[in-house]
Each structure stands twice: as structure tokens, then as C-alpha cells.
Amino acid sequence: MRARVALLLLATAVGCDSKDADKPAADGTLLTPYLQIQSTLAEDELDNLAELGAAVVSAAEGKADKPGVDKLLQGAGRIAAQDIATARSAFKTMSEGMIEYAKANPDKQDGTMIVHCTMTFAGKGAAWVQKEGKVMNPYEGAMMLHCGDKLQWSDEIPAG
């Protein structure tokens, strides 16, 4: 299954134009491409999502048994969508996985925070992980860029 997702993402990435200066970093971690996806969606962009999704799939190799990785892979398989609503829905699934993964691996939490926006997805709400600092909402972008409540890693995530 993972090999099929990786091939699909690779095929999508080959067919997409991308700016050379904006190439995603491939450092082998799950967090780096995830954070780049979060930032891209907060900017209401779709650039490099195929490559970033492929980087998540690649970084997940050997981690399939870790908490949250299955959801990260599910979302990564759909993140290269051609419309922002579908990409954001896929990112929601990825975020559920990233939160689960990071809660089980506290060393992955450094420099990051969980944010929850109660207004997104028609008031159902959703959470995500981002770098510490100003809230940058990947689900609403410019419409509500700074909408979201910062949570502690020990907090329970509101149901969405």
C-alpha cells in the first residue's frame, strides 16, 4: 500500500511544475515536510504539495508501526489535490496523525505547538501542528489567517 502511495505521489510530482527556489527540504523527518505543507496551505497555495507529500511518505518508511503514521500516510496520499478544499481536508487527516505521533514522541515537539480553530470545517473545528509563534491557519488561509487557540501538548484535543 505504501509503495503504491509513494508511486502515485511521485507520478503526480513529476507532472507538476514547481519553482526551483521553493523546492521542499528532504531531511528524512516527518515534521519538516508536514510543517511546509501547513505553511503552504496557510498562504492559500498548492505549490509543491505533491513533493511534500512524497517526502512524508518517504520519511514514514520504517515507522508504519508508530502511533499516527497511518493517518499521516492517508493524508499524504491525497495532499496533492488540485483544489485547496481537498488538500485542506487531507491535511486535517495528516494533522490528526502528526499530533498522535508527536504526543507519543515528545522529542518531536520541540519548537512546535498545537493550534485548534473551532470555526473551520463548517464549525466542526480542527487542530494542527505548527512552529511556535504567531498562529498561521492552514485551513482558512487569508480569510482567517490568525484564527486558532494555542494548546499545550498535554491538553486534550477538542473533538471535531
Image: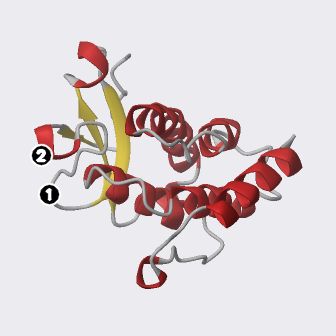
Is residue 110 shown left or right of residue 30?
left
Asked whether the viewer can see residue 43, the reply is yes
Residue situated in front as seen by the camera: 40 or 105: 40
Q: Is residue 136 above or below residue 22?
A: above
Dot label at residue 134: 1
At label 1, the amino acid type is: Lys
Asked whether the viewer can see residue 154, the reply is no
Asked if the residues shown at circle 2 and circle 1 are in contact, with their CB atoms under 8 angstroms apart, the answer is yes
The image shows residue 2 at horizontal and vertical percentages of 83, 46
Q: Quadrant of residue 26?
A: bottom right
Q: Is residue 26 above or below residue 34?
A: below
Question: Can you identify the residue that label 2 sits on?
Answer: 146
Taking the view exactly as shown, the residue that stands out farthest to the bottom is 21
User: Image point 58% across, 62% down: which residue?
Assistant: 16
Residue situated in front as seen by the camera: 68 or 83: 83
Q: Is residue 16 above or below residue 145?
A: below
At label 2, the amino acid type is: His
Q: Is residue 87 above or below residue 89?
A: below
The image shows residue 88 at horizontal and vertical percentages of 41, 37
The image shows residue 14 at horizontal and vertical percentages of 69, 66
Disc 2 to disc 1, C-alpha distance: 7 Å
User: Image point 83% across, 58% down: which residue?
Assistant: 62
Q: Secondary structure at mark 1?
A: loop
